[in-house]
Image (cartoon, rainbow, N blue to C red):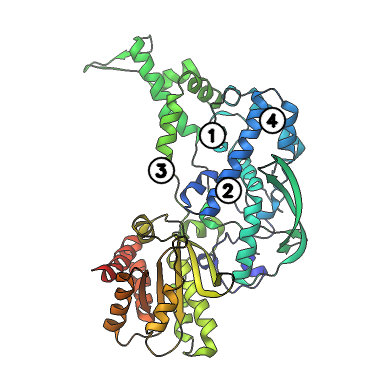
Amino acid sequence: MRISEHFSLGRSQPTLDFVDVDVVNDTPLFVDPLSLKLLSSVWASECISIIQNFFKAVISSIQSGDHENARRLLSSLGEPNETHLGLSVGVSHGRGMGNLLAGTVWDALSKSEAAKTGLLEDLEETVLMVPGIDVDIVSDITTNLIRPFLIRYTQEMCETYGIPLTDDVVSGPLWDPASRSWKVEYARLPTVNDGRLLLVPKGMVRQDLTYNPDKYFRDYIIPHLQREEISANSSLVQVLKKGGVRVTKKSVKEKYGFGKAVNARETLRNPAILKRYREEVKRHISPPLSHSELAAIEGSVLPDWDALIGEVQQTQVGNAEADRYEKAIEALLSALFYPALTNPHVQHELHSGRKRIDISYVNVMSNGFFHWLGSHYPAQMVFVECKNYSDDPANPEIDQLSGRFGPSRGKFGFLVCRKIENKTLLLQRCKDTAVDDRGFMIPLDDEDVFELVKAKQQGGDQALFEKLKAKFDHLIM
């Protein structure tokens, strides 16, 4: 049973911001710390900072010979069963860290020259060179370290989707960067099967880590050793009949061996190999899983565009069903604009509650139109105002949306309504707002939204980009 079913949310994975995991068994997905670098948000930056803080504390202890402290830091990590992610068979029990595994990780790091010499800069790099540390271990460590931020995210998503929270739930170990120590608190969290539940943004899970020891060995270590052998004109060099020379990968493996130990040894001899790999990975971080990839892994469904459109169409015009219209638009837009827009908030409060916005998203600028938008204009967040009435929006509605913009929040949004009779006049009002430097807003009625869905269905993200870019160009031309 998935979270959506357990809490009767009336939603499926495409319209949910978090991974809709099985609340009993594990879903074979992992938290990739490198994925956080794709999420251009304050939340992701906080997560990255706390991971680096902990990793430096552990490595510093090992380098200074304070192995007792290193073991203490590692053993304080708990088992992150509450996300229901990983490789457990049957009921989730998590590989976690625990005392036994903490000892294993400490033993691996303490014996690793890559760790002791300071060659490794980030947690995810341990996968490349430290035997015994694999994708599930790094995922578990990452989950433990970002637990404070997952708690906050979980609470926000529970408010958005109406998931009940339980008071005074034990938080699990929380890393304190200031004191470099662990603490435990109580928090309001959802519970299932007598255990706490943590929601994980679907934009940060992967089937595997971006850092891959086999790829590193195959595409970086071996070519480097081949060049060295050719330069030395060693016995591994073969002269080709048509001219030129070569060194086979097989002969390199036979001479040097293979695996993480070799990765570490050869990287210590030439750290520039790792530097090149880091630079290459930064340019090709694994993108978020698509709707179809998530469906295949989870056994869940693809977006049902007809049903999402139908819910909008079936909503009656007027104040009585304003909330229903708002929720229908949020569900449709969340599926349509994934993975670029994340962390939806409905009835989001601004200025200590003095202002409210119907829907707000964080623009993580991962791809498409919103990546372009955030690269050229203030668009840290994207705001949506929903007007479920028959008249065209006028200046008061435009002023209401523009009043939600700000330098730290962004200056872009959508004004969504049922039917725009005079599109020329409304567009001119939006252009006036842009010219006055009060922000950019694209007006959309139901048919415009449905056209965006059609573009996505027929032409994918590129077609959606072109549609939105054309509408934005009308504001500035």
Q: Which mark is residue 47?
A: 2
Q: CA distance from mark 3 to mark 1?
A: 16 Å
Query: In which image quadrant can residue 57 be found?
Result: top right
Among numbered discs 2 and 4, the one appearing first in the sequence: 2
Which residue lies most toward the left here? 242
Query: Is 454 placed left or right of 80 in the picture?
Result: left
Q: CA distance from mark 2 to mark 4?
A: 23 Å
Query: In which image quadrant can residue 240 be found?
Result: top left
Whether residue 306 is visible, yes or no, is no
Q: Tag 1: Cα neighbours inside 10 Å, few (<14), some, or many (≥20)?
A: many
Q: Tag 3: Cα neighbours inside 10 Å, few (<14), some, or many (≥20)?
A: few
Q: Nearer the viewer, residue 353 or 314?
A: 353
**Amino acid of disc 1:** Glu
Percent position of residue 56, x then y: 61, 34
**Amino acid of disc 2:** Cys
Among numbered discs 4 and 3, the one appearing first in the sequence: 4
Q: Tag 4: Cα neighbours inside 10 Å, few (<14), some, or many (≥20)?
A: many
Query: In which image quadrant can residue 107 be found?
Result: top right
On screen, residue 264 above or below 443:
above
- Which residue is at 40% across, 66% downward? 411
Q: CA distance from mark 4 to mark 3?
A: 30 Å
**Amino acid of disc 4:** Trp
Label 4 belongs to which residue? 106
Label 3 belongs to which residue? 284
Label 1 belongs to which residue? 125
**Amino acid of disc 3:** His
Q: CA distance from mark 4 to mark 1?
A: 15 Å
Quarter placement of the N terminus: bottom right
Q: CA distance from mark 1 to mark 2?
A: 17 Å
In the structure shown, which secondary structural element does the residue marked by tag 1 occupy?
helix
On screen, residue 389 above or below 451:
below
Name the front one of labels 1 and 2.
2
